[in-house]
Structure formats: structure tokens, C-alpha cells
Image (cartoon, grey):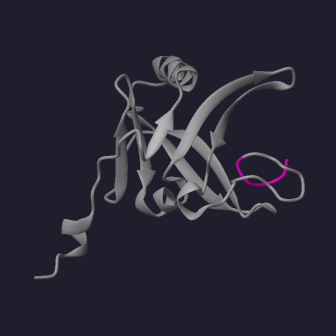
Amino acid sequence: MAQTAEAMFQSDLSPEDIKISDLAGEKIDELMDDADDEIEAVRIYVSGGGCGGMTYGMTFTDARNDYDTVLDAGKFKVYVDSVALGYLRGVEIDYVERPTGASFVFNNVFQATGGSGTCGACGAAGGGCG
């Protein structure tokens, strides 16, 4: 008997799906503490663009969508829509401080499909230049 799409949809993520480094987790927790009370999670998103093909980012969210997958990271939750998850599975999110500034970095993007997640022209991590 065939399962419906809704029955096949798994909303819970594990650290194998999306890993958050200790330093990134600490920074996200700090940012969540400073966020408005209605903020319930961090949303990770993927958008097209750049010479590497995709751009990765994070934002606060106050609502979960029907097809969001959820990573319970203990002190905070991470929402990823099921389409974006196809581009993110296996990613490690880290937080780095450089002389030019601090930022979150997406390592191992496209791990499931064998890609590097870096720009072929400039080598920028996360896909996309600039």
C-alpha cells in the first residue's frame, strides 16, 4: 500500500542532517536571548544566485510552516523547509571570527550530492561571490 506524501514527510531532523558547531550554537543561543519574545526559532534558507549557484543564510522566525523540518538543538530550534533541506543535508554550520568580521559559515554544503559548496571562480564558501 502506497504512503501519502504527508505520511512520508518526516519533520524531525538529527545532528547528522544539520550539524551546528559548539561555537555557532553558543552564538545562536546568545542571539535568541536578545531576540523578541515572539521569535520561536532560527530559519535556515537557501536561495538561488551567485556563480556557485546557491546562497545560504539564517534569519529569525516566529512561525513554523507546514513543511518545515525541525532540529531541536536544546536551547533553540532550527527550522528548514523540506525543499531547502535537499540542499543542506550534511551541512555543518560554524561561527568564525576573522579580521574582516565574524560570521556564520556553511561547511560541506551539497555533501549528499558530492559538491563542495564553494564558488569555482573565487573559492567563496557557501556558494556565491561577495
Q: Is residue 64 visible?
A: no
Count how many numbered circles sit on residues in the image.
Answer: 0
Residue 64 position within the rendered picture, expressed as x and y whole percent measured from the top left = 35, 48
The extreme bottom residue here reads 1
**Residue 128 on the magenta span:** yes
Q: Is residue 127 above or below residue 113?
A: above
Answer left or right for 101 relative to 105.
right
Answer left or right for 69 relative to 60.
left
Q: Is residue 47 above or below residue 43?
A: below
Residue 43 position within the rendered picture, expressed as x and y whole percent measured from the top left = 48, 43
Question: Residue at the spot x=66%, y=60% of the render?
Answer: 115
Dominant SS in magenta: loop
Q: Is residue 93 above or below residue 35?
A: below
Residue 99 placement: quadrant: top right
Answer left or right for 129 relative to 4.
right
Residue 23 position within the rendered picture, expressed as x and y whole percent measured from the top left = 57, 20
Residue 121 placement: quadrant: bottom right
Question: Residue at the spot x=40%, y=24% of the render?
Answer: 37
Q: Is residue 79 visible?
A: yes
Viewport quadrant of the N terminus? bottom left
Look at the image and give the residue range highlighted in magenta.
Answer: 126-130
Between 92 and 5, which is closer to the camera in this rendering? 92
